[in-house]
Amino acid sequence: MEFATFADRAATIEAESADLEIVAHVRDLLAEAGDDLPIVARFVQGRVFPAWDSTTLDIGPNTCYDAIARAAGTNVDADDVEDRLAERGEIGAVAASYDFGGQQGLGAFMGGGGAGAGGAGGDNDDHNNGGTGNNNTGNLTVREVNDTLTDLAAAEGSGSQDRKVDLLFGLFNRCSNDEARYLARLVLSEMRIGVGEGTVRDAIAEAFDVPQEPVERALQVSNDYGQVAETAREDGVSGLDEIDLEIGRPVQAMLAQAGTVTDALEEWDEAAVEWKYDGARIQLHYDPADPGDPDGDNKGETHVFSRNMEAVTDALPEVVEFANEHLDSPVILDGEVVAIDDDGSPLPFQEVLKRFRRKHDVAKAREDVSVRPVFFDCLHADGDDLLDEPLVERHDQLESVLAAERQQEPEEIDGFSLLWVTDDPDEIEAVDADALEAGHEGIMLKNPDSTYSPGRRGKNWQKRKPDVETLDCVVTGAEWGEGRRATFLGTFELSVRDGDDLETVGKVATGITDEKLEELTELLEPHIVAEDGTAVELEPAVVFEVGYEEIQTSPTYSSGYALRFPRFLGVRYDKDTEGADTLERLEMLRDE
Ligand code: AMP
């Protein structure tokens, strides 16, 4: 396809505002793309490479301005391009405002440094800022643009920026006004003609007469609009159904939204609960060594990708080592990489950033900050794609590929996140308390039956909302524990102030470790004023800071309100009962 044809269609699409019309134009464009279909399916979204491919053109705006200026003639420099950009607001309009015809025949195929710069301005009219006088017919094709940009992306090392400018100059020099508009936008990833991923998905389905659903699925597993468009055209639904996950080709990460234990348990019969690790998302692709491995190093093929599908393998040698040590079949795992201290305890998220995208001095950075992976999902195991399997099945697969043994105690297994499936809020609180105690961020609540939906932020994964507000409550009662905890006070009754009185608002029993219970018992025992069976009444003296999910009206407590899912956060040693929160504040927080 001529690049001029592509530019013409892009202009038509840009001028259209109705979504259905845009889909129809993209459909027609794809239908007439011929052999260039994969390229056109990407270009129309402003992409040169498939979404999964982290190759970039690595062209800054200045490189692009230089190339435009050089193609525009000797009287134009990058400053002039920037001035026009300030006036016109976007690079496409600027590129379209120059007449590139003047350099024709001179530098288009020369590409050598200075070919354009040294050339005479010829008949180029750099005062032509109307963008209408350029009838350049460089006969540029979309394939040539694609191939040149691919070469340009591959340019590395010293002199590579000059080479990039040369290659780009060669393209601009053959552009008409409209071609220059869309070339500049393509190069700077600013296509902005109103074509999103959904538009191309719908257009592929319409153009090649296949249902949307298999197109959508194929896009999710491949992240390659070019391949999917071509397969839809050549092999229809059966071809699309055969597109599977591939080791080395990343999938978009499933995302979480904020949620509460209340909502999770209302929505699902049971919730799958995991620790939430405070690190950076990774996707590990591993294929074990081929027995006839030509390198003879018997190491597998390992790729690590970020949440945005960038390759980060070289920055994270620990993850590669982990894969070689623990895996022996082809897998795709989803997880988090966490920075750790010398004892293996997690460090804050900022520490992981010192390692995550690092390109140089990785060994040195590793000496300063170590990282370790923790995996929580398995997308592919030994030849089978698992995206459509329920979470609990995928988690079982994860366990078996990591050869981890299920343990009942919430004890961390190396490289693997435990999963508790429960409908018991107290158990969820206990997992949360353990996660916080171990230095992690809290918990994730997941729908145990949910499939893996790449790139989606939905209800099936919820990160527990942090407490927006906390309350300082007076402890007015408690209960002696049972069994192992018989010598500890627990289940603490919480009250707020109402004038000179104290009114109860709930009881907090979970979120407290044995060590903490011992400390609280020592603190509260001297204040016991009455005992009835295991229940004790306490003289108001100690203030707890508690988190909660909601404040509800309730006949159970004397305040008329109850804290839903109260969590013990700590003792306010700095406060006496006079400083505790009031019923008035409770009512105010409830109304917020
Ligand atoms: P946020 O970044 O706050 O939206 O929280 C979601 C992120 O938490 C995910 O993208 C992961 O990087 C991270 N995360 C940590 N632990 C887990 C887990 N067990 N399951 C899913 N995501 C997790």
Image: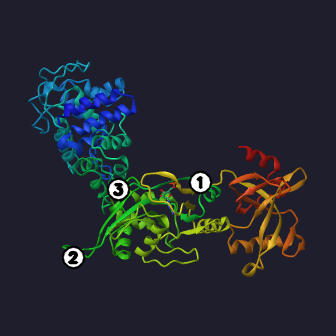
In the rendered image, the vertical position of residue 246 relative to residue 399, given as above or below: above
Classify 10 Å Cα crowding around label 3: few (below 14), some (14-19), many (20 and above).
Answer: many
- Quadrant assignment for the N terminus: top left
Q: Which residue is under mark 1?
A: 259
The percent coordinates of residue 285 (x first, y second) are: 34, 65
User: Marks 1/3: CA distance?
Assistant: 27 Å
525 left or right of 391 in image: right
Q: Which residue is under mark 2?
A: 296
Classify 10 Å Cα crowding around label 2: few (below 14), some (14-19), many (20 and above).
Answer: few
Q: Mark 1: which amino acid?
A: Gly
Counting the numbered discs, the total is: 3
User: Marks 2/3: CA distance?
Assistant: 32 Å
- Depth-wise, is mark 1 or mark 3 nearer the camera? 3
- Depth-wise, is mark 2 or mark 1 nearer the camera? 1
The percent coordinates of residue 17 (x first, y second) are: 39, 28
Helix, strand or loop status at disc 1: strand
Helix, strand or loop status at disc 2: loop
User: Marks 2/1: CA distance?
Assistant: 49 Å
Classify 10 Å Cα crowding around label 1: few (below 14), some (14-19), many (20 and above).
Answer: some
**Mark 1 or mark 3: whose residue is earlier in sequence:** 3
Asked whether disc 1 touches disc 3, contact meaning CB atoms under 8 Å apart, the reply is no
- Residue 180 seen by the camera: no
Asked if the residue at label 3 sits under 8 Å from ligand 1, the reply is no
**Mark 2 or mark 3: whose residue is earlier in sequence:** 3
Point 29% across, 48% down: residue: 56
Q: Which residue is under mark 3?
A: 221
